[in-house]
Image (cartoon, rainbow, N blue to C red):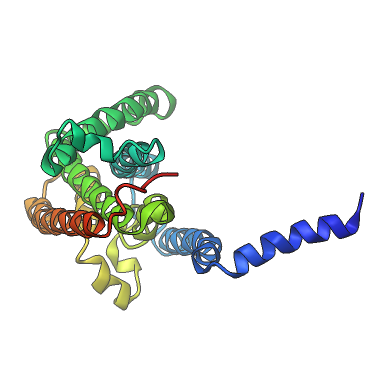
Amino acid sequence: MNLIRMYGLFLRHFYLIKGSLPRVLDLIYWPSIQIILWGFISKFFTNYSDYYNNTIGVILTCAILYDFLFRSSISFNMLFLEEIWSRNFTNLFIAPLTTKEIITSLIFTALIRTLIGLVPAIILTSPLFGVSILKLGIPLLFLFLSLYIFGITLGIMVSSGLLRYGPSFENIAWSSLFLLAPLGCIYYPIDILPNFFQILAKVLPLVYIFDEARNILINGSVNYSNIFYAYFLNIIYLCLSIILFYVSFSKAREKGTLINMGE
C-alpha cells in the first residue's frame, strides 16, 4: 500500500466536502434531526409514561400514518426525479403536455405507488402486533386524505426547487419530511415542545392530524375542529406550492435550464 496515494485520495474527498456547504449541512443535518426527534420522544415517555393506555397501538398507528405521508411526498418526488435522471423532462412537452396535466398525472401515480408500499405494512401489523389502523373508523379516510394532500404539497414544493436549482436540490427531497417530523408531533402531544417550537408547530397541519389520531384511539371520540384546521392549512399550502411550481417552471424556461436538466 502506498500512503501517499491514499493520502491524495483522502485530500480529494476532504476538499470536496470542505468546499461544498450543502455537503457539510447534509452531514450535520441527519444526526441533529435524529437526536432532536428521539430526544422529544424520550422526554415525553419519561414525563408521561402512563399517557397511553395502549402504547403499541397508538405508536404503530401514528407510525403508519407518518409512513403514508412520507411515501406520498417521496413518490411524487421520485416520479419527477425519474424524468430528470433520464433527461426526459423536456420530452414531456413534445407530446404536448401542459404543466397542469403533468402535476395531475404525478399526483394520481404517486397515490398508486404509496398504496402499493403501505397496504402490506397495514396487513402485517394485525397478526404481528394485534394492532389495526381501521380502529380509527370513518375519520381514518379524512386523516389519510389530509396527509396525502400535505405529502403532495411537499412534493410539489421540492419539485419546484428541482426546477429552479436542478439535481443539486435532490437531497431536500429526502430530508424535508424528517425536518418536519419533530414539529409534526407524530408520537407526542404539542405540549412536550418548547414554547418557540410550539408556535412553529401550530402552523403545520401535521399537528392537528396526529393529535386527532391519538384522540380517537385514546378517548374514542372525534374532534372535528382538528380535522377542519388540518384541511384549512392544507388548502393554503397546496395553493402556495402550485403557484411556486409555476413560478419556478417559468424561471427555468426563461433561463433555458430545462433543456440541460438531468444527470
Q: Is residue 113 left or right of residue 125?
A: left
Residue drawn at (87%, 60%), measured in percent from left and top? 4
Residue drawn at (40%, 44%), measured in percent from left and top? 262
In this rendering, the count of numbered labels is: 0
Please identify the quadrant where the C terminus is shown.
Answer: top left
107 above or below 211? above
In the picture, residue 252 is in which quadrant?
bottom left
Residue drawn at (33%, 46%), measured in percent from left and top? 53
Work out whether residue 165 can be spotted.
yes
Residue 72, horizontal then vertical, whole percent = 28, 40
162 above or below 112? below
Residue 14, horizontal then vertical, whole percent = 68, 64
Residue drawn at (29%, 53%), measured in percent from left and top? 163
Work out whether residue 50 can be spotted.
no
Q: Is residue 177 left or right of residue 243?
A: right
Residue 243, horizontal then vertical, whole percent = 13, 57
Query: In the current view of this chain or complex, which residue is farthest to the right?
Result: 1
